Image (spheres, coloured by chain):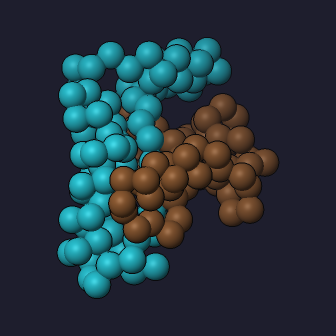
Chain colours: A brown, B cyan
Amino acid sequence: MLIRPKAGILDPQGEAVQASLAALGFAVTSARVGRLVDLEVDADDEAAAHAEVERMCAELLANPLIESFEIVTGPA
Amino acid sequence: MLIRPKAGILDPQGEAVQASLAALGFAVTSARVGRLVDLEVDADDEAAAHAEVERMCAELLANPLIESFEIVTGPA
């Protein structure tokens, strides 16, 4: 799953990345840094896996106040 | 772009996530934690943007010894 800082939330890590890339001469207009979590889940089908991972995000992995998450499922 | 710890590289953050999810009662067989960087780049076309971001990854954003990266491009 992909976890990103919500729009409007300060992202100091992204600002640092943007400044560092600019210092290296790269033209970047925006940089935002988030997290990526790859999970293997036992589930009957993809819909069940998606629902299970959504609960994990909400309960542990993402902070819904400041982060949005996106779940991408596929067979192992 | 998506940055992941390479297979075989210890991922303590992923192990912590797996243990925490197990403690909450979720059945997860594997968890790996990586980084996600969203960049906006000025480029003539998607191929040019891809090449530019690949250089950024190699020079600054990923550690090629222990991390692999995947670049996904699209229009702004």
Residue A55: quarter of image:
top right
Q: B50 left or right of A68?
A: left
Q: Residue at x 61, y 35 (%)?
A: A61
Q: Nearer the viewer, residue B12 or B45?
A: B45
- Count of numbered labels shown in the rendering: 0
Residue B2's x, y, as percent? 36, 49
Residue B52's x, y, as percent? 27, 64
Q: Residue at x 72, y 52 (%)?
A: A10
Residue A14's x, y, as percent? 56, 50
Residue A39: quarter of image:
top left
Residue B4: quarter of image:
top left
Q: B41 left or right of A10?
A: left
Residue A17's x, y, as percent? 49, 49
**Res A2 seen here:** no
Q: B40 left or right of A67?
A: left
Q: Nearer the viewer, residue B19 or A19?
A: A19
**Res B34 seen here:** yes
Q: Nearer the viewer, residue A60 or A14?
A: A14
| Quadrant in which the N terminus of chain B is drawn | bottom left
Q: Residue at x 44, y 66 (%)?
A: A28
Q: Nearer the viewer, residue A64 or A76?
A: A64
